[in-house]
């Protein structure tokens, strides 16, 4: 076997499609947003005041009916908000994703522009969209997210030492380990040439950040995360 054939065979073996995985974090069972709790308390007060003004006091007030209606509406909305499925956070080889009602919204590591903590939410700003996760709902998952982002794409992490400590220590064994079904690469552009990817078989991915390259334009180092690449690039 010639040297050229050996190199091609080695490159093909290195680019084998590997199984990508991520951890799935369901929201905390006792999670309820402060807005929902506050709205529920306000609705209860309005409903109680309306009942008193309409049926209990000696002379009913004309505004009592409005308070009853408004209070019931606000309380019902708060109860629905509190009981509604807040969704699921996923973190792993293909970045971060939000899952709800069988729909998945994903931001690849290479597409993240900024990871920050704003109040009680961790926000992930992507090139074509953003995701926000309440800390109270996903404490374990967000700690893992911050840790993985710090290893894979540290330049996008805009968290102070105090904020990282507030997120807690990540435990990589937490969450449900699940396979990643697919990563959409058709239609994306090669990072090295800016040429579009027309066929999945022509794409190669950085195993660290999922940046996409044409199979014959893979650089020695990933242009996004700077990791050694070359024959380490994998099939999409």
Image (cartoon, rainbow, N blue to C red):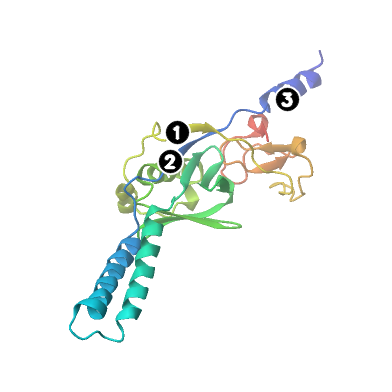
Label 2 secondary element:
strand
When the figure is inspected, residue 231 is found, relative to residue 142, above or below; the finding is above
Q: Residues within 10 Å of mark 1 (few under 14, many from 20)?
A: few
Q: Residues within 10 Å of mark 2 (few under 14, many from 20)?
A: many
* Residue 96 spot, x, y in % from top left: 51, 45
Q: Is residue 16 visible?
A: yes
Q: Residue at x 35, y 58 (%)?
A: 33
> Which quadrant of the figure contains the N terminus?
top right
| Viewer-side residue, 74 vs 167 | 74
Residue receiving disc 3? 12
Q: Residue at x 73, y 25 (%)?
A: 12
Label 1 secondary element:
strand
Give the CA separation, mark 3 to mark 1. Answer: 32 Å
| Viewer-side residue, 37 vs 191 | 37
Label 3 secondary element:
helix
Q: Name the N-terminal-most of marks 2 and 1.
A: 2
**Of all residues shown, which one is farthest toward the top?**
1
* Residue 160 spot, x, y in % from top left: 35, 54
Position of 195 with respect to 175 (left or right) is right
| Viewer-side residue, 143 vs 228 | 143
Residue receiving disc 2? 25
Q: Name the N-terminal-most of marks 2 and 3.
A: 3
Residue receiving disc 1? 176
Q: Residue at x 36, y 74 (%)?
A: 69
When the figure is inspected, residue 235 is found, relative to residue 166, above or below; the finding is above
Between circles 2 and 3, the one closer to the viewer is 2
* Residue 65 spot, x, y in % from top left: 33, 79
Give the CA separation, mark 2 to mark 3. Answer: 35 Å
């Amino acid at each position: 076997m010639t040297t050229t054939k050996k190199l091609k065979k080695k490159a093909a073996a290195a680019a084998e499609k590997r199984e990508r995985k991520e951890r799935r974090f369901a929201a905390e069972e006792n999670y309820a947003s402060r807005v929902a709790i506050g709205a529920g308390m306000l609705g209860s007060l309005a409903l109680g005041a309306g009942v008193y003004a309409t049926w209990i006091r000696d002379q009913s007030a004309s505004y009592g009916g409005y308070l009853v209606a408004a209070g019931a509406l606000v309380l019902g909305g708060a109860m629905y908000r509190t009981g509604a499925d807040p969704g699921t956070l996923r973190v792993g080889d293909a970045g971060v994703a939000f899952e709800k009602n069988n729909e998945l919204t994903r931001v690849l590591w290479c597409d993240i522009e900024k990871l920050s903590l704003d109040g009680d939410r961790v926000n992930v700003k992507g090139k074509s969209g953003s995701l926000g996760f309440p800390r109270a709902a996903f404490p374990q998952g967000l700690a893992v997210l911050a840790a993985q982002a710090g290893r894979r794409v540290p330049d996008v992490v805009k968290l102070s030492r105090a904020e990282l400590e507030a997120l807690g220590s990540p435990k990589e064994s937490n969450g449900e380990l699940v396979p990643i079904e697919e990563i959409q690469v058709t239609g994306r552009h090669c990072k090295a040439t800016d040429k579009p990817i027309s066929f999945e078989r022509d794409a190669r991915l950085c195993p660290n950040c999922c940046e996409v390259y044409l199979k014959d334009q893979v650089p020695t180092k990933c242009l996004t995360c700077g990791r050694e690449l070359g024959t380490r690039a994998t099939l999409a």
